Amino acid sequence: MNFLGIDVGGTKVAWTLIDGKVHIRDCGKVLVPKSRSELIATLREITNSYEDIAAACIALPGVMSKGKLIKAPNLKFMEGFALKTLEREYSFPIYFENDANTFAYGEAKLRGFRDLIGITLGSGVGGGVIIGGEIYHGSGGAGELGHVTFRFDGERCSCGKKGCAEAYLSKQFFLRRSREVFGLSKEPEELFSLAKEGDERAIAIFREFGRMLGDFLGSIANAFHPEAIVVGGGIAGGARVFTKEVRGEYVKTAIVRPLPKLYFSKRDASMGAAILAMENYRKERTKSA
């Protein structure tokens, strides 16, 4: 009996297949398609690749309400889509959840914390809040930490607002800042390579980013005072370039004690989605028994 988690991000679709003991059976990733029909076909292809799936969970970026993805700045072609229509294609239960929520949920389960904040850094900035071992949804869309105002009347965010954390802590920042410094926009991965080669301009960009991220995480610690904060997403993969700056600002900004533990993770949201599918499936089986 296996459980499938699929993470649909702004640039890639990743998936993880686990068994009932949370052993990884398979995983993979592809570039995210450019249209709704292509994405649905990709999801169908992934799920049809495996046998003995007991349940699956699809993690998506954005706000969900009443079975629809109602706000997804980094996946606009899926806005308004009735997610439940996908269930009719499968013989097993399929669940839907915000991608940062599943990332946070997986990290909490695997690290053994009951109160945890997960932050994902990539095309956007996602936030997942775990309280008492469960995802906190509030009235439905809690955890949109990337759209907390970070700089009053600051840079324009992809959501249309000005000054969101996402405008400073996602790929948007690196594209904008590299254009100012190098004269053309560079992806974070390219800047990582330059920084590792000793390019002082790239290193300075990451140091600036690290200070902003540490300040933001310190504010998150003050607001929630969780046991731990875990940072993931593609940009977190290069954390060694800016870890010193992050931790320095984090300690200065966070006033709560004990200071929440701070981790960087290379796992994506698909692992947490698979664990969530497994636990939802077991809860429903228990209720019907």
Image (tube, rainbow, N blue to C red):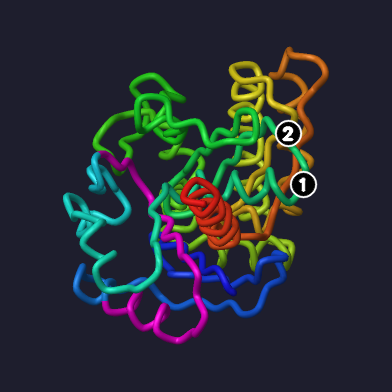
Q: How many marks?
A: 2
The residue closer to the viewer here, 257 or 7, is 7
SS type, badge 1: helix
Question: Relative to 50, is 225 on the left or the right?
Answer: right
Question: Relative to 206, is 156 on the left or the right?
Answer: left
Q: Amino acid at mark 2?
A: Ala
User: Label 2, on which residue?
Assistant: 228
- Asked whether the residues under the numbered discs 2 and 1 touch, taking CB atoms below 8 Å apart as contact, a structural biologist would say yes
Q: Residues within 10 Å of mark 1 (few under 14, many from 20)?
A: few
The quarter of the image holding the N terminus is: bottom right
User: Label 1, on which residue?
Assistant: 111
The residue closer to the viewer here, 259 or 99, is 99
Q: Quadrant of residue 220?
A: top right
Earlier sequence position, callout 2 versus callout 1? 1
Q: Is residue 61 magenta?
A: yes
Q: Is residue 129 magenta?
A: no
Q: Quadrant of residue 41?
A: bottom left
The segment highlighted magenta reads 41-65
Residue at image x 76%, y 27%? Answer: 260
